[in-house]
Image (cartoon, rainbow, N blue to C red):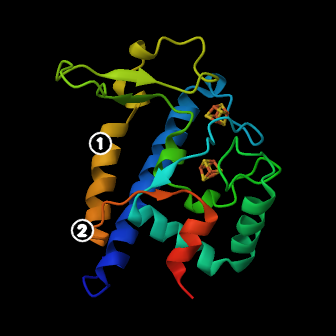
Protein backbone atom coordinates (compact mmCIF):
# COMPACT_ATOMS: atom_id res chain seq x y z
CA UNK A 1 0.00 0.00 0.00
CA UNK A 2 1.57 3.28 -1.12
CA UNK A 3 2.20 5.74 1.67
CA UNK A 4 1.81 8.47 -0.98
CA UNK A 5 -1.94 7.92 -1.05
CA UNK A 6 -4.00 10.38 1.00
CA UNK A 7 -4.72 8.98 4.44
CA UNK A 8 -8.43 8.51 3.71
CA UNK A 9 -7.62 6.44 0.62
CA UNK A 10 -5.20 4.31 2.61
CA UNK A 11 -7.86 3.69 5.26
CA UNK A 12 -10.43 2.91 2.57
CA UNK A 13 -8.11 0.42 0.96
CA UNK A 14 -7.57 -1.37 4.29
CA UNK A 15 -11.30 -1.20 4.97
CA UNK A 16 -11.95 -3.01 1.67
CA UNK A 17 -9.45 -5.69 2.68
CA UNK A 18 -11.33 -6.12 5.95
CA UNK A 19 -14.61 -6.48 4.02
CA UNK A 20 -13.03 -9.06 1.72
CA UNK A 21 -11.77 -11.07 4.66
CA UNK A 22 -15.20 -10.90 6.27
CA UNK A 23 -16.89 -12.02 3.04
CA UNK A 24 -14.39 -14.87 2.68
CA UNK A 25 -15.08 -16.01 6.25
CA UNK A 26 -18.82 -15.82 5.66
CA UNK A 27 -18.50 -17.95 2.51
CA UNK A 28 -16.31 -20.44 4.35
CA UNK A 29 -18.99 -20.90 7.02
CA UNK A 30 -21.70 -21.16 4.36
CA UNK A 31 -19.77 -23.93 2.59
CA UNK A 32 -19.42 -25.83 5.87
CA UNK A 33 -23.12 -25.51 6.81
CA UNK A 34 -25.05 -25.11 3.54
CA UNK A 35 -28.33 -26.44 4.90
CA UNK A 36 -28.23 -24.12 7.92
CA UNK A 37 -28.49 -20.95 5.85
CA UNK A 38 -31.90 -19.68 4.69
CA UNK A 39 -30.31 -16.50 3.24
CA UNK A 40 -31.42 -15.80 -0.32
CA UNK A 41 -32.46 -12.88 -2.46
CA UNK A 42 -35.90 -11.69 -1.38
CA UNK A 43 -35.30 -12.63 2.27
CA UNK A 44 -34.59 -9.34 4.01
CA UNK A 45 -35.94 -9.12 7.52
CA UNK A 46 -32.32 -8.48 8.55
CA UNK A 47 -32.37 -5.22 6.53
CA UNK A 48 -33.84 -3.25 9.38
CA UNK A 49 -34.37 0.51 9.27
CA UNK A 50 -32.34 2.75 11.57
CA UNK A 51 -28.88 1.27 10.95
CA UNK A 52 -25.94 3.66 11.14
CA UNK A 53 -22.39 3.53 9.82
CA UNK A 54 -19.13 5.14 10.80
CA UNK A 55 -17.54 7.94 8.76
CA UNK A 56 -15.23 5.58 6.83
CA UNK A 57 -18.02 3.20 5.83
CA UNK A 58 -20.09 6.23 4.86
CA UNK A 59 -17.23 7.49 2.69
CA UNK A 60 -16.96 4.11 0.93
CA UNK A 61 -20.69 4.08 0.15
CA UNK A 62 -20.76 7.74 -0.91
CA UNK A 63 -17.84 7.23 -3.31
CA UNK A 64 -19.48 4.09 -4.70
CA UNK A 65 -22.68 6.03 -5.38
CA UNK A 66 -20.67 8.90 -6.82
CA UNK A 67 -19.03 6.50 -9.27
CA UNK A 68 -22.38 4.88 -10.15
CA UNK A 69 -24.83 7.73 -10.81
CA UNK A 70 -27.57 5.38 -12.01
CA UNK A 71 -27.45 3.55 -8.67
CA UNK A 72 -27.39 6.86 -6.81
CA UNK A 73 -30.52 7.92 -8.68
CA UNK A 74 -32.18 4.56 -7.99
CA UNK A 75 -31.33 4.93 -4.29
CA UNK A 76 -32.77 8.47 -4.17
CA UNK A 77 -35.99 7.26 -5.81
CA UNK A 78 -36.14 4.24 -3.54
CA UNK A 79 -35.90 6.46 -0.49
CA UNK A 80 -38.78 8.57 -1.77
CA UNK A 81 -41.07 5.77 -2.94
CA UNK A 82 -40.40 3.54 0.11
CA UNK A 83 -41.29 0.15 -1.46
CA UNK A 84 -41.16 -1.44 2.01
CA UNK A 85 -42.74 1.44 3.91
CA UNK A 86 -40.63 2.32 6.94
CA UNK A 87 -40.02 -1.31 7.80
CA UNK A 88 -36.74 -1.79 5.93
CA UNK A 89 -33.44 -0.09 5.18
CA UNK A 90 -33.81 2.71 2.63
CA UNK A 91 -31.30 0.95 0.34
CA UNK A 92 -33.48 -2.14 -0.02
CA UNK A 93 -34.94 -2.10 -3.53
CA UNK A 94 -38.49 -3.14 -4.31
CA UNK A 95 -37.35 -6.58 -5.53
CA UNK A 96 -35.63 -7.21 -2.21
CA UNK A 97 -32.23 -6.38 -3.66
CA UNK A 98 -29.62 -4.29 -1.87
CA UNK A 99 -28.86 -1.27 -4.06
CA UNK A 100 -25.36 -0.95 -2.60
CA UNK A 101 -24.62 -4.66 -2.21
CA UNK A 102 -21.01 -4.28 -3.39
CA UNK A 103 -20.34 -1.57 -0.79
CA UNK A 104 -22.74 -2.63 1.92
CA UNK A 105 -21.34 -1.89 5.37
CA UNK A 106 -19.74 -4.35 7.73
CA UNK A 107 -22.86 -5.04 9.77
CA UNK A 108 -24.65 -6.25 6.62
CA UNK A 109 -21.77 -8.54 5.71
CA UNK A 110 -22.17 -10.51 8.91
CA UNK A 111 -25.97 -10.87 8.67
CA UNK A 112 -26.86 -14.54 8.65
CA UNK A 113 -23.65 -16.02 10.00
CA UNK A 114 -23.27 -17.12 13.63
CA UNK A 115 -21.65 -14.31 15.59
CA UNK A 116 -19.91 -14.15 18.93
CA UNK A 117 -19.40 -11.17 21.20
CA UNK A 118 -18.86 -10.12 24.77
CA UNK A 119 -22.16 -9.47 26.51
CA UNK A 120 -23.23 -5.82 26.54
CA UNK A 121 -23.98 -5.71 30.28
CA UNK A 122 -21.29 -4.09 32.29
CA UNK A 123 -20.05 -6.22 35.11
CA UNK A 124 -20.37 -9.43 33.10
CA UNK A 125 -17.57 -11.97 33.40
CA UNK A 126 -14.57 -10.80 31.32
CA UNK A 127 -14.30 -14.21 29.66
CA UNK A 128 -18.00 -14.63 28.94
CA UNK A 129 -19.04 -14.70 25.28
CA UNK A 130 -22.51 -14.88 23.82
CA UNK A 131 -23.46 -16.18 20.40
CA UNK A 132 -26.31 -15.22 18.15
CA UNK A 133 -27.59 -15.72 14.61
CA UNK A 134 -30.57 -14.73 12.48
CA UNK A 135 -33.60 -16.65 13.75
CA UNK A 136 -34.06 -18.18 10.29
CA UNK A 137 -30.60 -19.75 10.24
CA UNK A 138 -28.91 -22.58 12.17
CA UNK A 139 -32.29 -23.63 13.57
CA UNK A 140 -31.18 -27.18 14.35
CA UNK A 141 -27.75 -26.28 15.73
CA UNK A 142 -26.62 -25.45 19.22
CA UNK A 143 -24.55 -22.34 18.50
CA UNK A 144 -22.40 -22.89 21.58
CA UNK A 145 -21.25 -26.20 20.13
CA UNK A 146 -19.98 -24.71 16.88
CA UNK A 147 -16.18 -24.56 16.67
CA UNK A 148 -14.75 -21.02 17.05
CA UNK A 149 -13.61 -21.05 13.40
CA UNK A 150 -17.27 -21.31 12.33
CA UNK A 151 -18.34 -18.19 14.20
CA UNK A 152 -17.65 -14.53 13.36
CA UNK A 153 -16.03 -12.67 16.22
CA UNK A 154 -17.76 -9.31 15.87
CA UNK A 155 -15.80 -7.69 18.70
CA UNK A 156 -12.58 -8.19 16.74
CA UNK A 157 -14.18 -6.95 13.53
CA UNK A 158 -15.56 -3.88 15.27
CA UNK A 159 -12.22 -3.02 16.87
CA UNK A 160 -10.48 -3.21 13.48
CA UNK A 161 -13.24 -1.19 11.87
CA UNK A 162 -13.04 1.51 14.54
CA UNK A 163 -9.24 1.72 14.16
CA UNK A 164 -9.53 2.16 10.40
CA UNK A 165 -12.25 4.79 10.78
CA UNK A 166 -10.06 6.66 13.24
CA UNK A 167 -7.14 6.46 10.83
CA UNK A 168 -9.16 7.80 7.90
CA UNK A 169 -11.12 10.39 9.84
CA UNK A 170 -9.29 11.25 13.06
CA UNK A 171 -11.52 13.09 15.45
CA UNK A 172 -14.76 11.95 13.83
CA UNK A 173 -16.74 9.56 15.96
CA UNK A 174 -20.09 10.42 14.40
CA UNK A 175 -22.51 7.73 13.32
CA UNK A 176 -24.25 8.44 10.06
CA UNK A 177 -27.69 7.07 9.14
CA UNK A 178 -27.51 4.36 6.48
CA UNK A 179 -29.71 6.38 4.13
CA UNK A 180 -29.18 7.63 0.57
CA UNK A 181 -29.78 11.30 1.35
CA UNK A 182 -27.32 11.47 4.25
CA UNK A 183 -24.64 9.51 2.43
CA UNK A 184 -24.99 11.33 -0.87
CA UNK A 185 -24.67 14.65 0.95
CA UNK A 186 -21.07 13.66 1.76
CA UNK A 187 -20.23 14.01 -1.93
CA UNK A 188 -21.07 17.71 -1.82
CA UNK A 189 -22.13 19.64 -4.91
S1 LIG B 1 -29.82 -13.08 7.65
FE1 LIG B 1 -31.86 -13.98 7.98
S2 LIG B 1 -33.32 -12.45 7.23
FE2 LIG B 1 -31.29 -11.94 6.39
S3 LIG B 1 -31.22 -12.97 4.37
FE3 LIG B 1 -30.30 -14.37 5.88
S4 LIG B 1 -32.00 -15.68 6.53
FE4 LIG B 1 -32.92 -13.88 5.55
S1 LIG C 1 -27.39 -1.74 3.07
FE1 LIG C 1 -28.24 -3.39 1.88
S2 LIG C 1 -27.77 -5.27 3.01
FE2 LIG C 1 -27.51 -3.52 4.40
S3 LIG C 1 -29.45 -3.31 5.48
FE3 LIG C 1 -29.51 -1.95 3.70
S4 LIG C 1 -30.46 -3.15 2.06
FE4 LIG C 1 -29.80 -4.58 3.66
- What is the number of callouts on the image? 2
Locate residue 100 relative to residue 61 in the image: left or right.
Answer: right
Task: List the residue tagged with mark 1.
Answer: 156
Secondary structure beneath dot 2 equals loop
For the residues labelled 1 and 2, the Cα–Cα distance comes to 21 Å
Check if mark 1's residue and mark 2's residue have beta carbons within 8 Å. no
When asked about the image quadrant of residue 33, the answer is: top right
Residue in view at x 63 percent, y 65 percent: 180
Question: Which quadrant of the figure contains the C terminus?
Answer: bottom right
**Coordinates of residue 157 in the picture (x, y in percent):** 34, 45
Q: Position of residue 46 (x, y in %)?
A: 62, 37
Dot 1: within a 10 Å radius of its alpha carbon, few (fewer than 14), some, or many (20 or more) residues? few
Q: Please tell me which residue is depicted at 69% across the width and 72% down the height of the picture.
A: 72
> What quarter of the picture does the N terminus occupy?
bottom left
Q: Residue beneath label 2, please?
A: 171
Where does the image place residue 173, in percent across and percent down from the top left?
Answer: 30, 60
- Kindly tell me whether residue 20 is visible in this rendering: yes
N-terminal label among 1 and 2: 1
The answer to whether residue 63 shows anywhere in this view is no
Q: Which numbered tag is attached to residue 22?
A: none
Residue at image position (65%, 49%) is: 89
Instruction: Tell me: residue 48, above or below residue 34.
Output: below
- Foreground label between 1 and 2: 2
The residue at the point 62 percent across, 73 percent down is: 65
User: Mark 2 Cα within 10 Å, few/some/many (few <14, many 20+)?
Assistant: few
State left or right for residue 101 relative to residue 114.
Answer: right
Amino acid sequence: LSEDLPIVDQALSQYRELCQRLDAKFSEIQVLYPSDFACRKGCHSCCAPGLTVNRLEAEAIARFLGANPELAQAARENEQTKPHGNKRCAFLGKEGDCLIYQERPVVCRSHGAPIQMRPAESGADENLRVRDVCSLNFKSQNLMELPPASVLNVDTVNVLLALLAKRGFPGSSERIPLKPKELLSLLGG
